[in-house]
Each structure stands twice: as structure tokens, then as C-alpha cells.
Image (cartoon, rainbow, N blue to C red):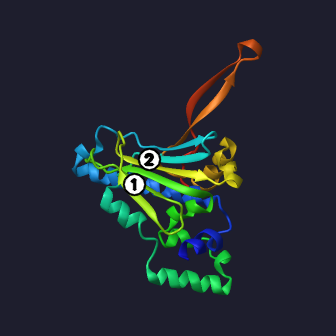
């Protein structure tokens, strides 16, 4: 019931899912930066902070990756296995009954439910994550947003988290480079860490034309 409220009633502006996931990735990076001040071994030689968007047109998936602190089995259950407290649920149901949800645009962020905004555009979400300092503890979490999830051991070469959204057929616009650029510019341009994406460009003309793939930063990283 609560997932239905979040997905269908709480938000009318679906594009904010990306803002929420980028914000979560920033938090994860800030946490490992802080921990690394006293435990530099946790950085594992990887301190070039970035958040990467990967759009796979063929698979219909959008992946948001970070090299933040990551999660282990227990923190995945704590952070992703419970949507919200009963008080929050009652509050959301009250809003729905009053028809006021559409007038509360910041509720997801306020109640820490940004991750679940993913299900507004995806019919399945897969998370692969590994916590800092524990190379053998990577886990894979997956759910269709209907009240249940699976959790199993996985492999991830580096510390951090990959969140893969299996987009619905009518939400494939969120795989387009221009659409992603626009959303990042609108909501996350000020983010301190670079938000990057592999972009294909065509150089030259006619028979001399060739395609190149390079990583580009989408945000200016300047404070508002």
C-alpha cells in the first residue's frame, strides 16, 4: 500500500527520481571521505570521487554508480528493506485521503524515501553494493516494488554502489543523453562531485567520419 502511495500518488514529477539517487550517491561519497580521514585504508586507493550515469538503450536500463562508502548485508536490509516508519505511513495516507499529496513536492526527501522514487519509472530495481574495507561482502538487492525483495551475495571489484533501474516501456525517455543532461542541470548542477556519463560523438564527415566515446561531466559543480 505504501509503495502504491509513493509511486502513484506522492509525486507527479517523475524526473525527480534522478535527483534523489544522485543525492544519495553524494551522501555515500561524503561518508567515505569522512571515514577516510582516520582510516585511510578504507579508501582502497580510490579517492577520485564521481557519480556515473550509464544508459543502456538495448537493455532499457539506467544505472547510477558511485564510489562512496557502500553497504554490507545488514546495512542494505536497514536502508532498503524498510520503507518508512508507521508514523510516516499514516501521514502519507492522510495526505492521499485529502488529495494533498500533489502539493507536497519535498516529501520524499524529507522522509528519506528518495530511493523508492525509482519505482515511479522502473518496474524493477537492482542494487549491487560493496562496503568499504570488505571485498568479500558485496551484495545484490532486487525488487519489483510490490512489497518483496531478494538479497544475495554478489561481486563488485571496487567499493561503492550500482543502482540499476529497469525502465518501463513508457519511461525510456530517461535513457536519452539530452534528457539526463537537462535533469542534472536542473536539480544537481551544484553537486560538489562530478556527475559523469559516457557520450558518443561523431568526428569528421562522410567516409572520414568516425564515432568516439568519451566520459563527460554533466554538472558545473558550482554552488547556487
Vertical comparison of 36 with 4: above or below: above
Q: Tell whether label 2 touches label 1 (CB within 8 Å).
A: yes
Task: Determine the image quadrant of residue 141.
Answer: bottom left
Vertical comparison of 32 with 50: above or below: below
Q: Which residue is mark 2?
A: 66
Q: Nearer the viewer, residue 39 or 15?
A: 15
Q: Position of residue 3 (x, y in %)?
A: 55, 71
The reply, left or right, for residue 103 in relation to residue 134 is right
The residue sitting at 54% across, 49% down in the picture is 222
Q: Which residue is mark 1?
A: 28
Quadrant assignment for the C terminus:
bottom right
The answer to whether residue 70 shows anywhere in this view is: no
| SS class, disc 1 | helix
Mark 1: give few (<14), some (14-19) or many (20+) Cα within 10 Å: some
Q: Position of residue 57 (x, y in %)?
A: 64, 40
Mark 2: give few (<14), some (14-19) or many (20+) Cα within 10 Å: many
Q: Position of residue 132 (x, y in %)?
A: 29, 49
The answer to whether residue 136 shows anywhere in this view is: yes
The residue sitting at 63% across, 39% down in the picture is 58
Q: Earlier in the sequence, mark 1 or mark 2?
A: 1
Disc ID at residue 123: none
Q: Position of residue 206 (x, y in %)?
A: 77, 15
User: What's the CA distance linking mark 1 and mark 2?
Assistant: 8 Å
| SS class, disc 2 | strand
The reply, left or right, for residue 103 in relation to residue 41 is right
Amino acid at each position: 500500500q505504501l509503495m502504491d502511495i509513493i509511486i502513484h500518488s506522492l509525486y507527479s514529477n517523475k524526473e525527480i527520481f534522478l535527483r534523489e539517487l544522485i543525492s544519495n550517491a553524494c551522501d555515500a561519497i561524503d561518508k567515505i571521505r569522512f571515514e577516510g580521514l582516520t582510516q585511510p585504508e578504507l579508501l582502497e586507493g580510490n579517492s577520485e570521487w564521481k557519480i556515473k550515469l550509464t544508459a543502456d538503450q538495448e537493455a532499457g536500463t539506467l544505472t547510477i554508480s558511485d564510489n562512496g562508502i557502500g553497504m554490507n548485508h545488514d546495512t542494505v536490509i536497514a536502508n532498503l528493506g524498510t520503507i518508512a516508519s508507521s508514523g510516516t505511513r499514516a501521514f502519507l495516507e492522510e495526505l492521499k485521503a485529502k488529495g494533498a499529496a500533489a502539493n507536497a513536492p519535498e516529501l520524499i526527501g524529507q522522509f528519506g524515501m528518495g530511493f523508492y522514487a525509482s519505482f515511479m519509472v522502473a518496474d524493477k530495481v537492482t542494487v549491487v553494493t560493496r562496503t568499504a574495507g570488505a571485498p568479500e561482502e558485496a551484495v545484490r538487492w532486487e525488487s519489483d516494488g510490490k512489497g518483496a525483495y531478494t538479497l544475495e551475495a554478489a561481486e563488485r571489484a571496487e567499493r561503492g554502489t550500482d543502482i540499476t533501474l529497469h525502465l518501463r516501456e513508457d519511461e525510456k525517455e530517461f535513457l536519452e543523453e539530452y534528457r539526463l543532461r537537462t535533469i542534472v542541470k536542473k536539480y544537481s548542477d551544484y553537486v560538489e562531485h562530478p556527475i559523469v556519463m559516457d557520450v558518443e560523438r561523431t568526428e569528421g564527415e562522410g567516409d572520414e567520419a568516425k564515432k568516439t566515446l568519451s566520459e563527460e561531466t554533466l554538472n558545473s559543480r558550482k554552488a547556487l
